[in-house]
Image: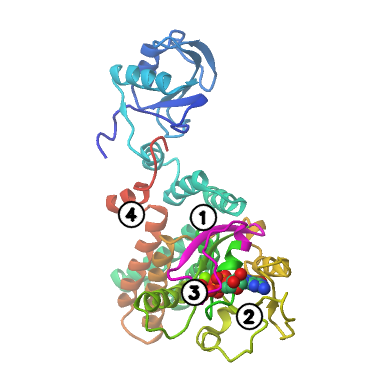
Amino acid sequence: MPGLFDTIVAPITGLQRAAVTVLRVSGTDSWDVARSVFDRWPNDPQPCQMIYGRFVHDDDGYAVAFEEGASFTGERSAEFSIHGSPASVRLLLQACLRAGARSAEPGEFTQRAFLNGRIDLTQAEAIRETVDALTDAQLRSANALRAGELSRRVGEAREEVLRALTAIEAATDFSEEIGGMDRPAVLSNIERASEIVRELLSTAKRGRIVRDGLTIALVGRPNVGKSSLLNRLLGQERAIVTAIPGTTRDTVEEWADLSGVPCRLVDTAGLRDSLDPVERLGVERTKEALERADLIWLVVAANEPWDDDPVVEAYGERVRVVANKIDLAPCDHEGWIGVSALTGEGIEGLLRLVAQESESIPGSTQVTVNARHRPLLEGALVGLVQAERTLTNGAPDDLAAVGLYDAAARLGEITGDTATPDMITRVFRDFCIGK
Ligand SMILES: Nc1nc2c(ncn2[C@@H]2O[C@H](COP(=O)(O)OP(=O)(O)OP(=O)(O)O)[C@@H](O)[C@H]2O)c(=O)[nH]1
Ligand SMILES: [Mg+2]
């Protein structure tokens, strides 16, 4: 990003037309910029107090001053609330640019907050997640991350690793002065660190479901009513339904909020051996959908005889059998969920099942790890396990330091303590202007 110390400006509310839009100016010269564009800017502004006045482009509104160390970015800054018409926003932006500010890059306000030590990398991610949250569960999860719980736990694990490392290094460098290493103490440091890392990793699946939704694949033989079920759950005619077997050729994905759980429903091409090349490609895609689904609903027709299905065997515990068309024949199979996509009967049972599968997701405030944290935690665990093995196998103690250094670096990358500029840029890459 250009000029880390430039004074920057951008609207921090949405870019669409609104009653009010807020512009933020951040950087050493922000108060001078404010003085140039706002007629009532005091010589000695009181921080966090709204002042009513007129802006140079002849709109009226409020201005607020923030002191260095007590603003979102950690820098001296000013915020202007003006009428949110495209013209008013554009004219005030231009006035700020003329007064010496430059336009903020996407994510630049948050990046400065990180660089100034106001937040760590996980909290920066949490800001993006908070802004992007569509469901209650996503907002709660983002808030938990923003509160810094993950950083605290990762920090504790890293502290244990650093203690173990210090003990090993000291014993290697000053063995004559301090005698041998306290092996049990070092091993228990490693053990405690591993425990925290394992515990955090155990939240990864739930984290993914909260963030990306529970992926549910609807699969089964042609014509059993998979697309009809999808449409019924969405409350709209999303997928084509006909009486002709092989109607769905490609996977159809759609978001749905089922019992408060964000779900990605994937309707698939009916599974059968076909010579039609298009249908065969569709069946290939069905197989891909099976691989990545959290949950597989094997749809069968209640009015047709049941053969053991290879899907149950191949995907075992992820599969639930949904017997559709119970308006035509009853479903008395133990453990199956009977529904009718046509009449809506039994759909409530299916929704209850979703809520059960997602366990406590909607009400949970527990912090979870995301797709960036997970491989770092897994890598850290590998280093910890290697170090523990080295120490218990009678290999030279300083060899254990290799795994521990690696673990400490990876844990530090999660919070940003040891992240390279490249990694930091990657975190901020998906932010939008004004964040
Ligand atoms: N009676 C009854 N008919 C249904 C029900 N659900 C679907 N159908 C009918 O079954 C036929 C097939 O429905 P689809 O939803 O296209 O079935 P599909 O499993 O998606 O089929 P493919 O895309 O070919 O794999 C249509 O004629 C639907 O109207 C139901 O619950 N009861
Ligand atoms: Mg279909």
Q: Residue flagged by tag 1: what amino acid is it?
A: Arg
Instruction: Report if residue 367 is visible in the image.
Output: no
Disc 1: CA contacts within 10 A as few (<14), some (14-19) or many (>=20): few
Disc 2: CA contacts within 10 A as few (<14), some (14-19) or many (>=20): many
Give the alpha-carbon distance from disc 2 to disc 3, as whole Å: 52 Å
Disc 4: CA contacts within 10 A as few (<14), some (14-19) or many (>=20): some
Q: Inspect the magenta stretch and tell me whether residue 245 lies in it.
A: yes
Q: Is residue 8 above or below residue 413?
A: above
Residue found at x 42% / y 25%: 77
Q: Residue flagged by tag 3: what amino acid is it?
A: Glu
Q: Which residues are magenta?
A: 232-260
Q: Residue flagged by tag 4: what amino acid is it?
A: Ala
Residue placed under numbered mark 3 in the picture: 191
Earlier in the chain: of badge 2 and badge 3, it is 3
Residue placed under numbered mark 4 in the picture: 419
Mark 1, secondary structure of its residue = helix
Give the alpha-carbon distance from disc 1 to disc 2, as whole Å: 51 Å
Residue placed under numbered mark 1 in the picture: 152
Instruction: Residue 424: give x, y in percent of width and height.
Output: 33, 50
Q: Closer to us: mark 3 or mark 1?
A: 1
Mark 2, secondary structure of its residue = strand
Q: Closer to us: mark 2 or mark 3?
A: 2
Give the alpha-carbon distance from disc 3 to disc 4, as whole Å: 25 Å
Mark 3, secondary structure of its residue = helix
Q: Is residue 104 above or below residue 266?
A: above
Nearer to me, 74 or 263: 263
Earlier in the chain: of badge 3 and badge 1, it is 1
